[in-house]
Image: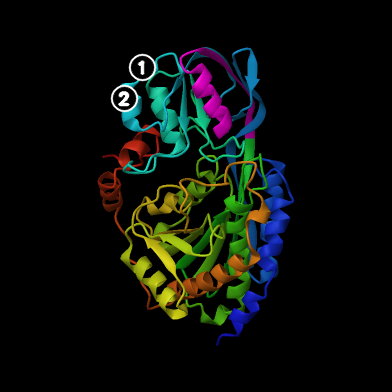
Amino acid sequence: MTRWIGELFTSDVGWDHLEALVDIGNRMAGSDGEREAAELTREALADAGARNARLESFDIQGWTRGESSIEAGEATHDCIALPRSPSANVSAPLVDLGYGLPDEFDDADLEGAIVMVRSDIPEYADRYIHRREKYYHAVDNGAVGFVYRNHVEGCLPPTGSVGTDDEPIGEIPAVGVSSEVGARLARRFDGDEIELVVEADLHDATSRNVHAELGPDTDERVLVTSHVDAHDIAEGALDNGAGTAMLVELANALASREADLETRVEFVAYGAEEVGLVGSTHHAETTDHETITAIVNNDGVVRDRTLSMTTHGFDDLEAAADAVEDRYDHPIETVPKLGPHSDHWSFVQWGVPGYHVTSTSDEVGRGWGHTFADTIEKLERRTLREQAILLTDLVVELAREDVTVAHRTPDDIAADLESQDLAEGMRITGDWPYET
């Protein structure tokens, strides 16, 4: 009964796939590297024993990075463009807005200014303020440029996309700067005119989702997901090579336990997550939500040894995670609040039960993620194996015929977004999907 645990704990299948992904280099949405990563993942799922391993293509707005710069005080200051920033050259006064909380935007005069905000939030903030929310507060308040300052030290400018579903290219030029460059700009040039230059190539592009299956051919299915794309500036080991490595490791483990699966398990590695959840949105728009019994979305795993699962108010998901925790006497953190970021959200927003599986962390934000430092040596093979044991058993639990996770209504999800103070941010970023 437990032989599979020993096999999994000595398996290199997931880690080998992680190494293959990071060695590709650039896996930006729509790039040749993303296509290669999708093809490698399809092959890895087939080799693990999953059936009908395939690619499904869809069109996206392509964006390729050019040169960017900030000119201030007779000097050029290092920066990188935020993906889907428009090409532009603007000169305007710099306004350092600190954390960039909504109230701080309301109190500032940003008309015709270039605004700079930090990537973190203060301890007293009621909730996390996403990069895109800060960007669109700047847009709505008349800013002509946006500078995103990393709070993590180490000369690491952060990346991360702007744009909306309706308008995938942002309205004003946007760049990321390191904590150190941001501190210099704030100290020396706050209130002074600076020049912000972004060059980028906009073009039509194609991305792909990877699909494969295990278990009986039931109408109902459990989705096990990740995203295969990454930002072009780093290996994308944590975000999200590790999640896709976990997907492959789980397929390998579940293939040896296929007789235990009472419901079909569908593995999906999404493309174009980093530019607005495009791949999972495409899937959500083209599949039957009622047949999905649960989603286990891996995005942020292996960062720390303890799993953290956002359960989005689905009590039955929390109970399933607690059952696995008790069975193995191994800690699993559950977070009952909503988390409207990553690929599960394309389904959860409509009431489909879904986990966002990450790792516990005392840090605000992504840590090394979305920077040059997102590299494989930050991760441990041991952690991948340990977490894969717990997640394998969780998927088997969710696939039992007698385990039912009730769907929620979109109205219930919308009400929770309002009560958890998340609705304002989603409205300003164009991500509010409801009529209310």
Question: Can residue 391 be seen at all in this image of the molecule?
Answer: yes
Q: Amino acid at mark 1?
A: Asp
Residue that carries the numbered disc 1 in the rendered image: 109
Q: Which residues are magenta?
A: 176-204
Residue at x-position 50% and y-position 51%: 283
Viewer-closest of 399 and 109: 109
Viewer-closest of 92 and 174: 92
How far across and down, in percent of the image, does residue 377 sit? 68, 55
Element under disc 1: loop
Viewer-closest of 239 and 48: 239
How far across and down, in percent of the image, does residue 350 sit? 36, 52
- Total numbered labels: 2
How far across and down, in percent of the image, does residue 398 sit? 43, 72
Residue that carries the numbered disc 2 in the rendered image: 106
In the figure, is residue 36 to the left or right of 164? right
Residue 170's tag is: none
Q: Count residues near mark 1 (Cα–Cα under 10 Å), then give few for <14, some for 14-19, many for 20+.
A: few
Q: Residue furthest front?
A: 187
Q: Is residue 16 above or below residue 186?
A: below
Image quarter in which the C terminus is found: top left
Q: Is residue 115 magenta?
A: no
Q: Count residues near mark 2 (Cα–Cα under 10 Å), then give few for <14, some for 14-19, many for 20+.
A: few
Q: How is the image coloured?
A: rainbow
Q: Amino acid at mark 2?
A: Asp
In the figure, is residue 359 to the left or right of 353? right
How far across and down, in percent of the image, does residue 305 sit? 53, 64
Kindly indicate whether the residue at mark 2 contacts the one at mark 1 (C-beta within 8 angstroms): no
Element under disc 2: helix
Residue at x-position 60% and y-position 74%: 253
